[in-house]
Amino acid sequence: MTVPVKLAVAGVGNNISALAQGILHYADAVAGGADIDALPGVRRGSIGGLAVYDVQFVAAYDIDPGKIGTELYDAMLRPPNNYPRLDVRLEPTGVTVEQGLTDSDEHAGPLSDQIVRLAESLRAAGAEVLLYSLPTGLQWAATAYAEAALAAGVAFVNCTPESVGRDEELSTRFIAAGVPLIGDDLASHLGTSIVHRSLLGLLAERGISLHSSYQLNLGGNQDFRNLRDRGASKRDSKLNALAKAGVQLDRVDVIPSAGFVAHLEDHKVGYLNIEGVGWAGTPVEIDLKLKVQDSSNAAGVIIDLIRIAAAAVRVGEKGFVPAAVPLLKSPPKGHGAYTELEVEASYDSLAARIA
Ligand code: NAD
Ligand code: NA
């Protein structure tokens, strides 16, 4: 029998609600006879021998007083989280949300003491992977949670644009300790970045010159509210994602959170505009609207990142794992550092050695 990934999560927001409810959704589907290799919305049925529902939550951290001390499945449904309640049965996980790291020493003591406490909690929970899913823009927190994971010998997955996987000094220490480190910034399952990049790549491939392009995103969840004020790292990361297609960045603008529209809840609406120049200087114009369930878009990728991280732990791989490259907006050394063949070989090595 497969031993499930022992997963700890930092930040019990919409992403965790989408991840946890989705995992139960697929467990039900497979129990009802669905083919594990043909599940709608799943990229890979198995990674390193792990199915999408082979995940056990073992620890959770947050700083929201309404979530701390609460059973994980209750906490993930508390406002301001607004991912929909799916039609799945939520049996208690036995995991109570613990106080997370804070940058003020008012409540929890200096950060270094808190990191030691968090590392002890991760070890006591037997966690294999710590998923970092805090609001964007908290570089101190990303570094501090990564330090706690490193101290505990637990693999780290960074969902946010903060620099962790790209931090060479930190990455060298993860490698020295033999621990996987996966980041940065997850590339949504089917988000504006990949659609934008594909279309710009198509223009280039057809010899249509790019005149100008923009991408505007609207949403009604906390992530959007936060990105309005702290969007700089997200904007850079989205531009990194576009650079993969060799796009001339001086002709493209990206507005990660053009507006917070409460009634959109956890939906995201992305507007893309592309203006090009075709034959004999005549114009080509594309306007496109994309609407997605924003945090499903995250969970569909997180499920692969955590399976990659756990499989890497189990086969003794350390530092960055190339299988994660297509799942990230800002992988270390950029998207061009690994070929598709190397990415596939990385998946194979996670699977081959575990069998
Ligand atoms: P969210 O705002 O719903 O959840 C964040 C959670 O972190 C909240 O519960 C908050 O209380 C908690 N938190 C804040 N400070 C904390 C601390 N110091 N310690 C522990 N917990 C803390 O956000 P989300 O929708 O779950 O997204 C999480 C991250 O993933 C965001 O940074 C987002 O930009 C990133 N991301 C999301 C997507 C997507 O949803 N499609 C795609 C790429 C990246
Ligand atoms: Na989200």
Image (cartoon, rainbow, N blue to C red):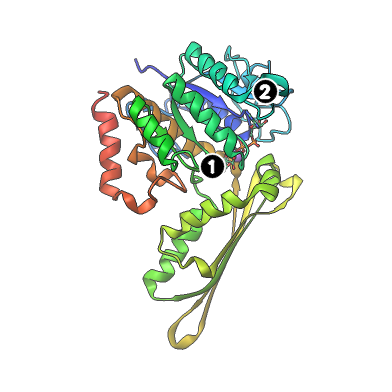
Check the image and report above or below for 334 versus 250: above
| Quadrant assignment, res 85 | top right
The residue singled out by tag 2 in the image is 75
Residue 288: x percent and y percent?
Answer: 58, 63
Mark whose residue sits in front, 1 or 2: 1
Check the image and report above or below for 92 versus 229: above
Residue 92: x percent and y percent?
Answer: 60, 14
The yes-or-no answer for disc 2 within 8 Å of ligand 1 is yes
The residue singled out by tag 1 in the image is 162
Q: Secondary structure at mark 2?
A: helix
Taking depth in this image into account, of 69 and 54 the one nearest to the observer is 69
Q: Which quadrant of the picture is home to ligand 1?
A: top right
- Residue 32 visible: no
Image quadrant in which the N terminus is located: top left
Check the image and report above or below for 56 versus 277: above
Residue 51: x percent and y percent?
Answer: 39, 27
Marks 1 and 2, how far apart in space?
25 Å
Q: Residue at x 69, y 28 (%)?
A: 104
Q: Residue at x 57, y 49 (%)?
A: 233
Q: Earlier in the sequence, mark 1 or mark 2?
A: 2
Q: Residue furthest bottom?
A: 280
Estimate how packed mark 1 is, as few (under 14), some (14 to 19) or many (20 or more) residues with alpha carbons within 10 Å.
many
Residue 68: x percent and y percent?
Answer: 68, 19
Q: Secondary structure at mark 1?
A: loop
Taking depth in this image into account, of 339 and 15 the one nearest to the observer is 339
- Give the amino acid type for the residue marked by disc 1 in the picture: Glu
Taking depth in this image into account, of 150 and 268 the one nearest to the observer is 150
Taking depth in this image into account, of 147 and 218 the one nearest to the observer is 147
Left or right of 274? Residue 243 is left
Q: Residue at x 52, y 38 (%)?
A: 159
Left or right of 173? Residue 290 is right
